[in-house]
Amino acid sequence: MTGEFSPDWLGLREPADADARSLELVGLLPRPVKVIRDLGCGTGSLGRWLAPRLPVPQFWILTDRDHDLLEIAADRMPEGVNVAIDERDVAALTRDDLTGADLVTCSALLDLLTAAEIDRLVEVCAQARTNALFTLSVTGQVRFTPADERDAEVEAAFNAHQRRESGGRLLLGPDAPAYAAAAFEKAGARVITRESPWRLGPQCPDLTAEWLRGWVGAAAEQRPELGFDAYLRDRLTSLPELTVGHKDVLAIFE
């Protein structure tokens, strides 16, 4: 893969992200939504998707620890949207940071966090009574057409990799969307979730091939003894139709 957070990879996946996110949840957002804090914004693809679907005026606070990605995101936001950048680790967000914010949002972030980090993020949102829309969290479910008897073994290894310990942090991986939904409910929010799967295949060969390399590569890193090279080669030779499970989570503090 070109890099999990590289501009090339983020750009390659942006159309699939846009097609997958739940428009229904956007329609359920309490209005007004004028001040939005985007956590782990990357190159700003969520902002480019969501901003045109919300009334103006809007003020977006783009938050990421990668300065170069922040610069790209700020430069590419839709015209007429006011933007500020905030270079920091999203896990360090405080209640004061949400003063005046109508919405906290993110894309493909929750599965990279720990239980304690999600608990802290939910606590901060609850303290500030700020609604949250967290999109495209990985659920760990992948379905192929045609199927291969090796699919389940690779999926299990990948999901174990997503739940790995990294730098002393035990990642939630595919458990994250359900964990976050339960945490928001416990904090008093009304929670609505919707499936938001990617749909890949020969119609988007570059993204499908790159995703396969990353998916199998992570599985092989977790279980190198299983030898997934032949599986990857077979899948790349004839790209399958596939769905990659994601879930969107909307939390409303009423």
Image (cartoon, grey):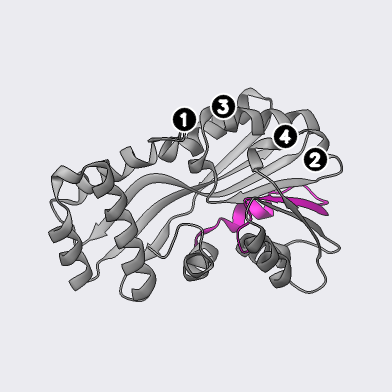
Q: Which residue is mark 4?
A: 125
Q: Nearer the viewer, residue 246 or 11?
A: 11
Find residue 168 and name its label: 1
| Start-end of magenta stretch | 20-43
Residue count near mark 3 (Cα–Cα under 10 Å), binned few <14, some 14–19, many ≥20: some
> Based on the displayed image, in which of its 4 quarters is residue 59 positioned?
bottom right
Helix, strand or loop at label 2? It is: helix
Task: Identify residue type, mark 1.
Answer: Gly
CB contact under 8 Å: marks 3 and 2? no
Q: Name the N-terminal-most of marks 1 and 4.
A: 4
Give the distance between the C-alpha atoms of the residues marked 3 and 1, in whole angstroms: 12 Å
Residue count near mark 2 (Cα–Cα under 10 Å), binned few <14, some 14–19, many ≥20: many
Where's the C terminus, which quadrant? top right
Residue found at the very far top of the displayed protein? 186
**Measuring 65% from the left and 34% from the top, which residue is drawn there?**
121
Q: Nearer the viewer, residue 132 or 10?
A: 10
Magenta span has 205?
no
Q: Which residue is mark 2?
A: 98
Task: Identify residue type, mark 3.
Answer: Ala
Give the distance between the C-alpha atoms of the residues marked 3 and 2, in whole angstroms: 19 Å
